[in-house]
Every structure is written in structure tokens, then in C-alpha cells.
Image: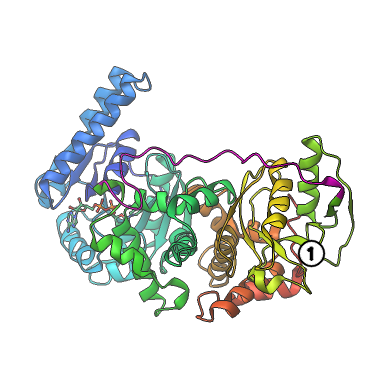
Amino acid sequence: MQQALSVSRQVAVIGSGVMGRGIAMVAAAAGHPVCLYDANGIASSQALEAIQQHWQRQADKGKLSAEALDRLCGRLSRAEALEQLAEAGLVIEAIAEDLAAKQALFCQLEQLVASDCLLASNTSSLSITAIAASMAAPQRLVGMHFFNPAPAMRLVEIVRGLATGADVLAQVSATARAWGKETVAVRSSPGFIVNRIARPFYLESLRCLQQGQADCATLDSLLQHSGGFRMGPFALMDLIGLDVNLAVHRSIWQAMCYDPRYTPLWIQQEMVAAGWLGRKSGRGYYVYPQAEPAVAEPLPAPCPDWVQVDFNLAQPVAAVLAQRLQQAGVRVTGQHQPQEDWLFRIGPAHVYVSDGRPAARREQAGQPCLLLDLAFDYQQVTLLAAQSSPSLSAAQRQALEAVLSVAGIRLCHLADGAGLPVLCTVAMLVNEAAEVLQQGLASAADIDRAMCLGLNYPQGPLAWGQRLGYGWLSQVLRHLAAYHGDGHYRVSACLQQAASVSSPVSFRAEEL
Ligand SMILES: NC(=O)c1ccc[n+]([C@@H]2O[C@H](COP(=O)([O-])OP(=O)(O)OC[C@H]3O[C@@H](n4cnc5c(N)ncnc54)[C@H](O)[C@@H]3O)[C@@H](O)[C@H]2O)c1
């Protein structure tokens, strides 16, 4: 088994932006001398200063001793020229996401550094095979993909290009683990595991925003509070950098031969064209510094006429809602209608979990309806997106809303259309994960682990899909595809297969 790089060897980090800074901090904390280089000398000076200030703040808070602070600062230096990196034992490149620039840099580097120096790229989405192709010794290059912020995120994807040497791969993996990171192995392919599967996390909310269904703060709240994601997509894009995120979208889209599943949206291009790049430029989808978006408390609602509320306790979600009402001191009665998918009803007005069809199409024989979004955990959820069918009267909607409000759930009403934000996001995440699995790019366990560790997802997409039912999710995607008709929601063959052998078509959510 290959040993990790000795801590006496220097780690050179090229590119001192968001990622280069974080990676330099990780390597220095692991005990290596670290040298930062940036084509823009001012950027590397600023990076050095910012890192030292960060450590100083840690020391001021008592999280770092004065000696540890001195040791860390003493390990950090910057180079004015690439040639000064000749002594490095590992070079990690974190420059702009530009294939030609990365190719040119590694061709220069392999001439400059010692033959045992490891060469790694932190590219988010470019092919390691393509970056290495113009090198004299392409077997030297490996992908070492950190996540933002690098000191905090536990995952590093170790990416194997077609030519990457097994010994290089093993030593870089061992080094990342010695630095306290968990690694997953993946073949070089568009977006690797995490950035490929994560595309819908951004795209589904961007589609809602572009269609005027909801604003950024609302969508972020929904994905956080209903979906269980640590950050909403817009806050996360602002953290990543809108230019970097768009470059990743474009590169995956191009590498996938312009598959409509990955098409970037014009709104992303507008933001980048304006120079609104997120936190690093002081403005992105939010303006910085900003207060955290406030989440409103559930609205007080008039108490509905409980006698008329009828629960379908055969539906697991309905059973959970009924239980929440009971916990709020309300006596609930219901019936078991396993063949029917409504959750509860008041008179003719029915409540369902959305299955990707608009509420207008879900109305049955004069029965108006309200559709609820998917929640990661219906026992805990306090906010849900909802859509109403056209014939649901204001009084009916208010009565249904009041039931949920007593259970501690506030609704965020969106215009009727196909699907709701969390449902579309989760269905597409599972679809993409199934495709990555089918293509043999990584194991099922690594796919789920990577999404939880790299992006703090509340559950791996494959396990999440299994919990919801692959059959039900396939049906949701077919409904979305039929409505939009643009190929974006095409069901992965792997998901269809899994659906045909294992799952019922009804919404399952077994482990609520
Ligand atoms: N931002 C993220 O969340 C994130 C996460 C993982 C991976 N990445 C990847 O890491 C890389 C860097 O991303 P970032 O967000 O830190 O970018 P950034 O824009 O914050 O910083 C890039 C830095 O590279 C410097 N640079 C550009 N070309 C150079 C060259 N030829 N030689 C030396 N320096 C050069 C720039 O001056 C800049 O300081 C990209 O490949 C990106 O896809 C980004």
C-alpha cells in the first residue's frame, strides 16, 4: 500500500482563490510546508494575509494556541514565479476552470518539478484525461477534488484519468486521508460523482426562479426546511462563485453532448455577465454582507371544523400528519383507503403529495385539491410548498391550511404547474445518481457517501430514492417529462429498471 506524502515535503498550491486558500490551510494544518503561487501576485499576497488573519481569529477565540499559530504561519509562504515550486513533493492546481490554461500549466510543471513530485488538479468538472493529454507523462496527473470550504468539508474525490498511474492514485489517496479527509474513487467523467449528481440541486430551483414561481429566498427556505439540505441552492451558488458554478454547468453540458438534462439557464449567464459572482464580488443572488433570510413563524390560523376532517390513514404521510395533530391536542379520526392516495379531506377538497402533475390535472370529478411538496421528514417539517387546483375556493384552502397549521406546518403557495421544488430536485438527484451507478463510475456506497460528505446532503440519493420508491419517482419524472416535453426530465434507464423489479408505483415513504 502506498504511503502518504511525508510531511517534510512541500505542498505547492497554484491559484490562490477560494479553493487554493482552503487547500493551503488543510495542507499546512497537516504539517507540510506550503507555498502558494498565483499568476496574479496581488492575489497570492492577499490570500496569505487572509489565511493568517483567519488563524489569528481562531487563536483569539482560544481555538488555537500561540505556538500552534506560529507553527502554522511559519509553514506558509508564497512564490513570485512558478520556478520557485521546483522543490515541491505535491502540486495541487486550483486555477480557473479552463482546460487550455490547466493543460499549459501542467506541461510547464512536469518539466520543472522532480520526477517523484505528485501532480493533482482540483478541477470541478474538466476531464483529467484531457488535462493530462498534452503532458509528456500523463500518468503523473490525478484529480484531487476538494469541496468548499476545503478545511471544513470532509470529502476529497480522487479522480482517475485514463492514463493516471495506479501508484500516483494510491499515494494521493493516502495523502488526502492522512490530512483527515475521506476519499471516494471515481473515473474521470463529466462532473465526477458530486458535481454531476448535484446539477439538479441548482437547475431545478433556477428553473423555478426563471419561470417566476418563487424568489431565491423562498426557494432556499423550501430546500432547507422541507428538503433537509444544509444550504439552499442560491446561497450555495453564492458561496461557490456564480462564474465557477456556470463553468461547471457548461462543461458538463458540453461533455454530455448538450443533453437537455444539463442545459444551463440564461439567468446564470446574466448574473455572470453583470459581474455578480456571489460572496467573492459582494453580490450574487444575495447582497453581502447580508443577514440570514428570516423564516416566518407559522401563521396563526382559525381552528377548522374538526368534525369534517377526514384522514386517509393508509397513507404514511397522512398517518404522520394525524399524529402531529394528536400531539397538538386534537382528536383525529380517519379511515383506511389503501387504493386512494389522498392524505386528508374536508368535504370535497382533497390534499395530496404532489406526483409531478399540476393540481389542475389532479382534480377529480369536481373534487378540488391542494398538493403538498415532498419533505425529507414529515415528522419534523415546518414549511411546505403547495399548489392549489383552480376550483379550490379561498375558504376551502384556508380550512386545509388551518389543519396543517395546527400540526405546525406553514404553507408557501406557488402557482400551479408541474411539480414542486423539493420534489423536482429530489427526483432528479435520484435519477442522476442512478445514471452514475449504471455507468459504473462509482459504487452505490461511494455515491451516497460522496453526496453526504461533499455537500452535506441529509441522505445519499440512492438510499433516499429507495426510501421513496423508485417506481413512484419514475412516475413523477414521467409526469414532469410529459408536461415539459423538452427531454430535461428523461427517466434514467437504471431507475426504470429498478422501478420495474422492486417498487410499487404508489408513494411509499416507508421510513417517515
Ligand atoms: N469554488 C468552488 O466551490 C470550487 C469547489 C471545488 C473545486 N473548484 C475548482 O477549483 C478551481 C479554482 O476555483 P476557485 O473557486 O478557487 O477560483 P477563483 O476564481 O476563486 O480563483 C482562481 C485563482 O487562480 C488564479 N489563476 C488563474 N489562472 C492562473 C494561472 N494560469 N496560473 C496561476 N494562477 C492562475 C486567479 O488569479 C485566481 O486567483 C477551479 O478549477 C474550480 O472548478 C472550485
As drawn, 156 above or below 48: below
Q: Is residue 183 magenta?
A: no
As drawn, 348 above or below 31: below
Front residue of 165 and 56: 56
With 420 as the anchor, is 499 left or right in this view?
A: right
With 212 as the anchor, is 245 left or right in this view?
A: left
Front residue of 461 and 388: 388
With 288 as the anchor, is 111 left or right in this view?
A: left
Report the residue marked by disc 1: 341
Q: Secondary structure at mark 1?
A: loop
Residue type highlighted by circle 1? Asp
Label 1: few (<14), some or many (≥20) within 10 Å? some
Percent coordinates x, y for residue 285 in the rendering: 35, 53
Which scheme is used to colour this image of the protein? rainbow
Residue 163, visible in the rendered structure: no
Span colored in magenta: 282-307
